[in-house]
Image (cartoon, rainbow, N blue to C red):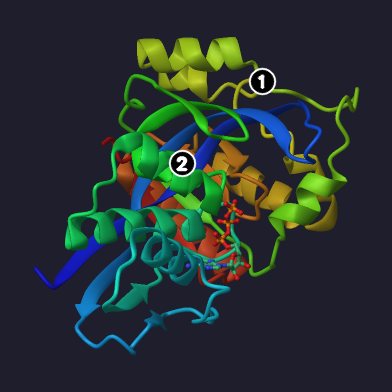
Amino acid sequence: MNETKLYARAKINIGLDILGKREDGYHNLVSVMQSVYLADEITVKKIDKPDYGIKVSVENANLPQDERNLAYKTALRVRERYGIDTGIFINLKKNIPVAAGLGGGSSDAAAVLIALRNLYGLNMDEAELYKVGLELGADVPFCLTRGTCLAEGVGERLRRLNPFPPAWFLLVKPPVHVSTADIFNKYSVGEKTMQRPDMERLLYGIRTGDLHEICREEVLVNVFEPITGAIYPVIYEIKKLCREYGALGASMSGSGSTVFGVFIERESADNAARRIKERLGYRDIIVTRGFNA
Ligand code: ATP
């Protein structure tokens, strides 16, 4: 086998709370993470020329193709660690909006790790895969696991949960660039006025497959929302529109700027997508479904 193709799925955060800041500057968080069908398409090829190095080509997005690209960084790390002496070519077809809180870069990294392990038959057990993944990014371990998980620590402590009940997600990304690092830095731990998600209730909703419980206003809460929302108030407008057009609930994913609405029927999600597109004219408005590994 000289070539492999994989889907790198996006994730959304169903409820996100920050428990504290760590000495290393990272934050301890708790969140239910959910994979969705929306995915980048990753092709990895073994190139039998020793001086070829690593080449990354990106379709559909304006992203660096050098070591600043997480897919490149992943290949470089694996190449050095396992002494791979062939060239590696990676094509990324980006369907996941970039810098959107949908974990696109982390998912690409996870897919490249799996692709290289398979292509080169690397002696890389699960523990090793997760270790290398975590070095590349806090969300990479989840992107290796996929499905529905409770994530804790910086996102590396994962517990698989019952699959998210059947639902359609409408993802709306405003055309603004949110830096995850900026939003984390602006968050001050212990902010008293901040609304926090009722995680017990969220976990109960997932355990019992009760979508209404999950979508309660006090459950579907992301503590980063007031921070990103203060810079881009359109976040609140999108949430309002999602609800107006039939979403059971709506929330921001990660540090934003994507807002997702939760719908029971595909038709109502499609209809909301159409109406929001008419109102706001954004390019990145996507209807997708939960992906359960
Ligand atoms: P997170 O919430 O995990 O930070 P995100 O969904 O908000 O992720 P990404 O789409 O992963 O954001 O991109 C974050 C930054 O990483 C972007 O500014 C982008 O330039 C950089 N980046 C590097 N490699 C990639 C990649 N393969 N896909 C997307 N972004 C990448």
Asked if 219 appears above or below 179 in the picture, the reply is above
Q: Quadrant of residue 199?
A: top right
- Nearest to the observer: residue 249 or residue 293: 293
Disc 1 target residue: 218
Q: Where is residue 192 in the image (x, y as percent from the top left)?
A: 91, 22
Q: In which quarter of the image is residue 195?
A: top right
Q: In terms of secondary structure, where does tag 1 sit?
A: loop
Asked if the residue under mark 2 is in contact with the one under mark 1, i.e. CB atoms within 8 Å, the reply is: no
Q: What x and y, as percent, mark residue 164?
A: 36, 27
Q: Where is residue 11 in the image (x, y as percent from the top left)?
A: 45, 46
Compute the Cα span from label 1 to label 2.
35 Å
Q: Name the residue under label 2.
A: 131
Q: Pointer 1: residues within 10 angstroms few (<14), some, or many (20+)?
A: some
- Give the residue drawn at x 72%, y 47%: 236
Which disc number belongs to residue 114? none
Figure quarter occupied by ligand 1: bottom right
Q: Residue at x 48, y 34 (%)?
A: 33
Q: Is residue 179 above or below residue 185?
A: below
